[in-house]
Image (spheres, rainbow, N blue to C red):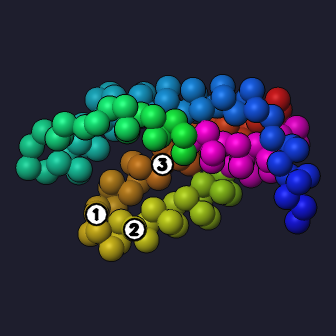
Amino acid sequence: MNFSILFSNIQWFPVVVMTLLSFVIGMLWHRPFLFGRAWVKENYPDGSPHDINAPLVFGGTAIVHFIALAALSAFVSATGGLNGFLGGLSISLFWILTAIAGTYLFASRSLKLLAIDAGMYIVLFSLCGFILGVW
């Protein structure tokens, strides 16, 4: 695998757009009409969420999503919609889901929470893979 070729495949503007899209998907995913209530109940069974450091949480999330989506772009950019979708789906199922599942097993987190959290990434990477594959 030639990393200089992969790096040259990255389409930076679409990666920025997909990073912004990741926040839209996350916002919708965690709304009460989708999975927000269940997510809060699973994460905070004793009550309401704790205060967060918003700049750290949102800034850190933007950085790690940008890095992950840049890597996805390296593999699927301009390969076509189906290839991009399948690439994003494969990455999310075989790497992201399995990594999160291992962590959740050790932390004794619920299967329901795993489905909610990993499900968002399966949707995110599949959709972004499709878009990056076409772009």
Judged left or right of residue 114, residue 21 is: right
What range is drawn magenta here?
Answer: 65-88
Image quadrant where residue 21 sits: top right
Report the quarter where the N terminus lies.
Answer: bottom right
Judged left or right of residue 95, residue 51 is: left
**Circle 2 or circle 1, nearest the eye:** 2
Image quadrant where residue 110 sits: bottom left
Residue 54 — which label?
A: none
Q: CA distance from mark 3 to mark 1?
A: 15 Å
Residue at x 72% of width, y 47% of height: 72
Residue 119 — which label?
A: 3
Vertical side of 59 occupied by 75: above or below? below
SS of the residue under disc 1: loop
- Residue 109 visible somewhere in the drawing: yes
Q: Earlier in the sequence, mark 3 or mark 2?
A: 2
Vertical side of 7 occupied by 81: above or below? above
SS of the residue under disc 3: helix
Judged left or right of residue 17, residue 30 is: left
Residue underneath mark 2: 103
What amino acid is labelled 2 in the image? Thr
